Amino acid sequence: ATDRITRSLTRVGWDSIASVLCDARDIPATYFASNHTITKFGSATDRSGQFFPFRRHPHNIRLYLAMNSLEDKRKVAMMKVVYAHFAGNFCLDLFEDMSPSLIIEILGFVNLGFEALNVQ
């Protein structure tokens, strides 16, 4: 039944699930409000009955679930912050009103998150 539900989810449904797994409203929400413990959502099997979790899930859902499977939840939170706020194109306006010392701390945190992502 769960696989039937995952097949019928709309884009809005998948986006809602993604926002639970990685709340990207802002950095504190990503770190503190995102769910870092859910590791499975639905399942699928091939014709031989072999279990393939997440086969039909969008890439971001599979990524968040894979991150959540790590034991170190602090590392999971850091990885999600980097992925949601610093991967690809991001706006430097975030740093505009910050003190230089806070910028240095944040960049150190971001570096740890990138290191965690690269290890995986």
Image: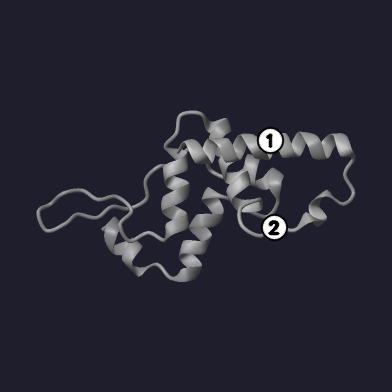
Residue drawn at x 77%, y 34% as measured from the top left: 105
Asked if 20 appears above or below 35 in the picture, the reply is below
Q: What is the crowding at mark 2: few (fewer than 14 residues within 10 Å), some, or many (at least 20)? A: few
Q: Position of residue 17 (x, y in %)?
A: 49, 56
Q: Position of residue 31 (x, y in %)?
A: 64, 41
Q: How many numbered circles are shown?
A: 2
Which SS class for mark 1? helix
Q: Report whether 73 appears left or right of 26.
A: left
Q: Position of residue 96 (x, y in %)?
A: 87, 52
Residues tagged 1 and 2 counted as in contact (Cβ below 8 A): no
* 11 and 84: which is toward the camera: 84
Residue type marked 1: Phe
Residue drawn at x 16%, y 49% as measured from the top left: 50
> On residue 55, which mark appears?
none
* 115 and 12: which is toward the camera: 115
Residue drawn at x 42%, y 37% as measured from the top left: 69
Residue 23 in view of the camera = no
- Earlier sequence position, callout 1 versus callout 2: 2
> On residue 109, which mark appears?
1
Residue 26 in view of the camera = yes
- C-alpha span from label 1 to label 2: 16 Å
Q: How is the image coloured?
A: one colour
Find disc 2 in the rendering and name its residue: 90
Q: Name the quadrant containing residue 112.
A: top right
